[in-house]
Image (cartoon, rainbow, N blue to C red):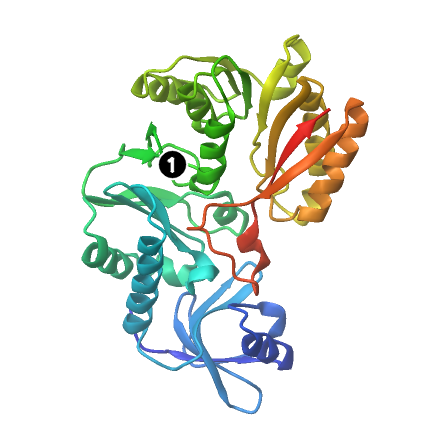
Amino acid sequence: MSWSPTGEIIVASEGARRIEEGQLNIYIKWLKGVRGPVTHGDLVVVKDEKGESLALGFYEGIGAIAVRILSRQIESLADILRRRLEEAFKLRNKLKLDNFFRWVHSEADGLPGLIVDVYDDVAVISSTSVGFDRRLREVSSIIREIYRPSSIVLRNDTRTRKEVDMPRRKEILFGDKTSPIIREGGALFKVDVMEGQKTGFFIDQRLNRMEIGDLAGPGDKVLDLFSYTGGFSIHAALSGARVTAVDESEYAIEALKVNSSLNSVIVRSFQSRVKEFLEGDRSTYDIIIVDPPALAQSKEAVNRAIRTYTAVNAAAMEKVIYGGLMFTSSCSQFISKGTFLKILERASSLANRDIKVLGERGASPDHPVDLNHPWTSYLKGFLLQVL
């Protein structure tokens, strides 16, 4: 694996303009030519049509992306990777998080196509970049020097990789620990970094889970829909609430039981599709959480996702007591904040309920947003009062 550029990528004026503006993903439609023995994942110099050097990046040539930009300077790749990882780690230290955090949030940390999550002493790497795929050993080495984890796990089994025909695999790159225990405020969670969704846990909802714990009180009835391993449920139960959790995954329900035991709380759980549960449930609740998986995985899926978001939010609103609270979110990058608000407005009309928006909620601050890459702000959430 070469640390030096193997060739040059020539981009059209539109691609050059995007680089100047700070875009880190240069699409194939802006590609004008390739010079040199360049293969997928190679380090390349990006130039404009006049021959002026613009940036250094990985040649991808997979899906719609031609090049992932790493630096506007022509410099050592080893220096770039180390600097970016050190800067990202320094930011997370400033944020004074618990013993888990997102270390690298792709474009927002200047490493497009790379995710690094930390759960106690286990680091998890996830890549959608051929360039980073070819440099996993080097990235792992820098991670070990900066953080000294006991284990490093690779989770290259995402849906995104499948969609662009990238090989999917998950494996332990270093060490042997795969089930760390993390601390979130007063709650503890066991994370299975090999079998859990994404990299094992949904770090992005950290502050929203803790807020539900603050809002729930002794005796409150709380319904946690799409509960996964019980993040919202555990926080509510620790506040003395009577919690019902619903998820269709057997794995999620079993993991929720483990986390309930770990925190010495009781959560009533149901393995069921949310739609079917709501249709058969006759209860009402003081607080309801609606936190579904990404329902729009592509632009083509947006219309169907809107219908599903609308239906599930309307059904949930019907079961909130008058004056009760509802936290609802969408992690679909193709559903904008404005569209999601319209969904909630339509859902309230279908449920024959009025709603007040008490506040907008987003991802934990270890998921910084790069304004040049709006998808880094994929999580949209709203706290509602239902009347």
Q: Give the quadrant of residue 222.
A: top right
Q: Give the quadrant of residue 30.
A: bottom right
Q: Name the side, left or right, on which 343 lies relative to 118.
A: right
Q: Which residue is mark 1?
A: 200
Q: Give the quadrant of residue 177.
A: top left
Residue drawn at 28 percent across, 71 percent down? 78
Viewer-proximal residue among 25 and 164: 25
The spot of residue 276 in percent (x, y) is 64, 15
- Quadrant where the N terminus sits is bottom left
Viewer-proximal residue among 44 and 267: 267
Residue drawn at 55 percent across, 79 percent down? 20
* Rendered position, 70 above or below 193: below
* Rendered position, 196 above or below 17: above
The spot of residue 93 in percent (x, y) is 31, 54
The spot of residue 335 in percent (x, y) is 66, 46
The spot of residue 62 in percent (x, y) is 51, 60
Q: Name the side, left or right, on which 247 lies relative to 278.
A: left
| Mark 1 residue type | Gly
Secondary structure at numbered mark 1: loop
Q: Is residue 113 visible?
A: no
Viewer-proximal residue among 293 and 147: 147
